[in-house]
Amino acid sequence: MTELYDAGRRDELAANLATVHDRIDRACAAAGRDPGDVTLIAVTKFFPASDVEHLAALGVRDVGENRDQEAGAKFADLPTDVRERLTVHFIGQLQSNKAAHVVRYADVVQSVDRPKIAAALDRAAAGAERTLDVLVQIDLSDATGRGGIAPEAARALAAQIADSATLRLRGVMAVAPLNADPAPAFERLAELAGAIRADHPQADWVSAGMSGDLEQAVAAGATHLRVGSAILGYRPGPR
Ligand SMILES: *Cc1c(COP(=O)(O)O)cnc(C)c1O
């Protein structure tokens, strides 16, 4: 790519990022919350490592990816000094045979939704002699398909994670149901998060809210927002 293209892309990302921060600031003001308590995760799936570099230069510290192969290649391509400044969140559906690969590049796995995945990540992290921050992904749709464990099974999965040798339970994650008002779903998530936090006080992250519903997520107390298209632009393929 030419330098001109690159400067244009950087300016576009900077403008989009400013718009998103503005939305977060206004949502926090409306909810009486401190924007410093909300972490913005830029979801860079489908976009190249060069965009991750631009975002890092623009002050982004957290990035999210949902496809294992793509993510592994992307972070291997990043200069070490850029990679070291980033926290990489894996947010996609995960198969247990991919756990060892994910543990090579992810700092956080947000999409733990089955006992088998938790066990596989625990083994993989032990093999890599590291600890791993994880969230329990909860299905708020009552019609499985977008990933996540049923709400009534979430506390048991949280307990399994908390008892594991290498996984650190940090909280919960969810995607709002399609074609429905996100606000009641995020309220329900906040209740479940509170119940899990009562058992495990350190598990105080609530990852909720995307490009289309970050305001509702902030209003419901989200601590982490996963924003893709509002920062990076439209992407081909499924979300
Ligand atoms: C892609 C994705 C996002 C970001 O979605 P946008 O609507 O582009 O902001 C957030 N969370 C998960 C789990 C995703 O897969």
Image (cartoon, rainbow, N blue to C red):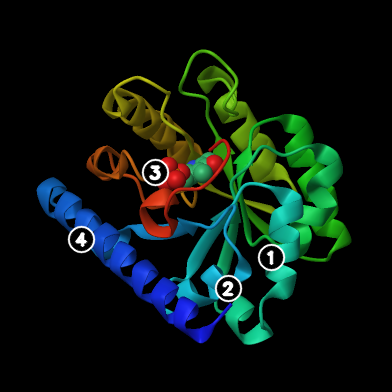
* Residue 22 numbered mark, or none: 4
Q: Residue at left 54%, top 76%?
A: 53
* Residue 210 numbered mark, or none: 3
In the rendered structure, are the residues bearing label 1 and label 4 in contact, judged by CB atoms less than 8 Å apart? Answer: no
- Residue type marked 3: Met
Q: CA distance from mark 3 to mark 1?
A: 22 Å
x and y percentages locating residue 42 in the rendered image? 46, 59
Q: Residue at left 33%, top 65%?
A: 17
For marks 3 and 2, give the one nearer the viewer: 2
Q: CA distance from mark 1 to mark 4?
A: 28 Å
- Residue where numbered disc 1 is placed: 74
- Residue type marked 2: Ser
Question: Quadrant of the rendered structure where residue 96 is?
Answer: top right
x and y percentages locating residue 12 in the rendered image? 36, 68
- Residue where numbered disc 2 is placed: 50
Q: Is residue 155 above or below residue 10?
A: above
Counting residues from the start of the chain, the first of labels 3 and 1 encountered is 1
x and y percentages locating residue 174 in the rendered image? 47, 35
Q: Is residue 183 above or below residue 31?
A: above
Counting residues from the start of the chain, the first of labels 3 and 2 encountered is 2
Q: Residues within 10 Å of mark 3 (few under 14, many from 20)?
A: many
In the rendered structure, are the residues bearing label 2 and label 1 in contact, judged by CB atoms less than 8 Å apart? Answer: no
Secondary element at image label 4: helix
Counting residues from the start of the chain, the first of labels 4 and 3 encountered is 4
Q: Residue furthest top?
A: 143
Counting residues from the start of the chain, the first of labels 1 and 4 encountered is 4
Q: CA distance from mark 2 to mark 1?
A: 9 Å
Q: Nearer the viewer, residue 4 or 220?
A: 4
Q: CA distance from mark 3 to mark 2?
A: 22 Å
